[in-house]
Image (tube, rainbow, N blue to C red):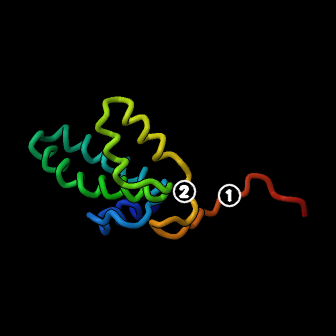
Amino acid sequence: MDEMMAAVKTCFNKYAEFKGRADRAEFWWFALFQFVVLAIIGMVSHVLYGIACLALLLPALAVGARRLHDIGKSGWFLLIGLIPFVGWLVLIYFFVQPSGPANEYGGQMAAPDAPTVMPGPQ
């Protein structure tokens, strides 16, 4: 839960920042947050749902562009999502890719500490 809150806080702190990089976890935690918030608000009121959609649109576009930067693609690739069905599939494919090496958008993202599944020889 701390990781989700950190990702959401980062996305709101970088509300309209399209420069830099966002790792996979930051993007997907914010997407989950956005889905849950919009689902709950949508059950309450259609007017509030519209306001929430507008409020979350810019940070969603910004984190999407930063996520594409993380894999070495331009943020303009978000426009592929305008192509019905196929565009969303291509974007999802891009969004699930692991972080790439350092590129023109910034240095390499720090890899999270992976838990040891099997201890090595001692």
Residue drawn at 41 percent across, 64 percent down: 6
In the image, taking residue 14 as reference, residue 54 lies left or right, namely left
Q: Secondary structure at mark 1?
A: loop
Q: Residue furthest right?
A: 122
Residue 90, position as x, y percentages in the image? 43, 38
In the image, taking residue 20 as reference, residue 84 lies left or right, namely left
Q: CA distance from mark 1 to mark 2?
A: 18 Å
Q: What numbered label is drawn on residue 99?
A: 2
The answer to the question of whether label 1 and label 2 lie on touching residues, with beta carbons closer than 8 A, is: no
Residue 41, position as x, y percentages in the image? 20, 44
Residue drawn at 23 percent across, 51 percent down: 57
Residue drawn at 31 percent across, 44 percent down: 79
Q: What numbered label is drawn on residue 115?
A: 1
Q: Specify which label sits upstream in the sequence, 1 or 2.
A: 2
Q: Quadrant of the N terminus?
A: bottom left
Residue 44, position as x, y percentages in the image? 15, 41
Q: Amino acid at mark 2?
A: Ser
In this view of the protein, which residue sits in the foreground, 121 or 82? 82
